[in-house]
Image: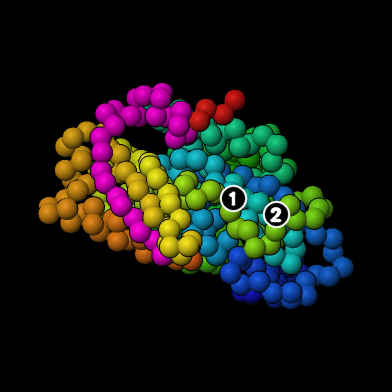
Amino acid sequence: MISKTAVVSTDSNTVYSLEISCYNSRNMSDEIKSNENEPLRTAVVAIIGRPSAGKSTFLNTACQEPVSIVSPIPQTTRNAIKGIVNTSFGQLIFIDTPGYHDSEKKLNLRLRNVTESQLEGIDCVLYVIDSTRAPGEEEAKTASLLKELQAKTVVAINKCDLPSSRPLPVRQFVSEQLPNIPGNRIFEMSAEKDTGINEVLKALYDISPEGEPVYDEELYTDQDLTFRVCEVIRGEAINRLQDEIPHAVYVEVADVEHRNEGKKLWIRAFLCVERESQKGIVIGKGASKIKEIRTAAVRKLSEIYIQKIDLDLQVKVDKNWRQRDYTLNRLIPQQK
Ligand SMILES: Nc1nc2c(ncn2[C@@H]2O[C@H](COP(=O)(O)OP(=O)(O)OP(=O)(O)O)[C@@H](O)[C@H]2O)c(=O)[nH]1
Ligand SMILES: [Mg+2]
């Protein structure tokens, strides 16, 4: 069990220590709950925000596992990804969503559809805002999604570790756009440096319904093997590619075999790009780029799965897939 401690100041300026015991799949314990008399709370929490606000980084830090891929490139997350946090207060089932981006391109419409559909039937919202960027039109559109959900929303002003962080204009923006969210539900954090996260979690528990955990404590995500493998490879690829190429990449797992009496996981996967010219760049000189991506993906997968990973990774072209419903339907199925 990993224990995180945060210092929280109350109205009367007294400071107390808030301990949130975080369990994860590899480190279970039967530690006594820190608030034994309180009923457990369980909630489904949608994480909403502009592209690159740090939603996936928050999820990974809160879960203490690499649940969702992270990159400096906007529109990294393409699907609704579940990450489960268990603490002595109960269970928070987070749903990471694609960054909310206003564009009429087919892929963007799909991503928006994924995000909007996650706002139905949830218990809470975590609205993540990047404090290093001025909240402009895109932020206002994102906030407008939450107008009817203010009673369920906690705001996390992110990237406060950076010198360019400006939390004050963000607070001002929130008070104008979402005036019914009280100040004690707006927090400053660094998802990357793990500061302020416990306060955000506690605030979410405070507005969560009472209830027993839905998932076993050892579970931190519900992604199946194929999806996770695709995402890990895509994550390693997009962090090593530039310009338009990260947006033009998707990963297809063609085969998975359990070999050597289950001790080895043999995977055949394709990194798909949109054009022949992109294929050459992804392969690199003397196949150096694809080798680098493959090695990094194997390393990451080996941290997740106990089996030895044997990855056969090739590059192929799926011409203009971002315009084609056939591929989009497979990768990002239309929600309702
Ligand atoms: N310095 C700093 N960087 C951060 C923080 N949180 C996220 N980042 C960086 O911001 C970039 C975007 O982070 P993501 O977690 O992928 O953002 P996202 O909101 O999930 O983005 P999309 O999936 O594209 O919507 C990455 O380069 C992160 O490392 C933070 O608290 N501090
Ligand atoms: Mg993301």
Q: Earlier in the sequence, mark 2 or mark 1?
A: 2
Dot 1: few (<14), some (14–19), or many (≥20) neighbours within 10 Å? Answer: few
Asked if the residue at label 1 sits under 8 Å from ligand 2, the reply is: no
Tell me: 212 left or right of 263: right
- Give coordinates of residue 83: x percent, y percent: 59, 53
Q: Is residue 280 above or below residue 35?
A: above
Q: Which sits in the foreground, 2 or 138?
A: 2
Residues at discs 2 and 1 in contact (Cβ within 8 Å): yes
Residue at (65% x, 68% y) in the render: 23
Tell me: 114 left or right of 286: right
Q: Is residue 315 magenta?
A: yes
To which residue does mark 1 refer?
222
User: Where's the N terminus, which quadrant?
Assistant: bottom right
- Give coordinates of residue 177: x percent, y percent: 59, 38
Task: Give the amino acid at mark 2.
Answer: Tyr
Q: Which sits in the foreground, 199 or 111?
A: 111
- Give coordinates of residue 270: x percent, y percent: 32, 43
Residue at (40% x, 45% y) in the render: 255
To which residue does mark 2 refer?
215
Name the residue furthest left: 286
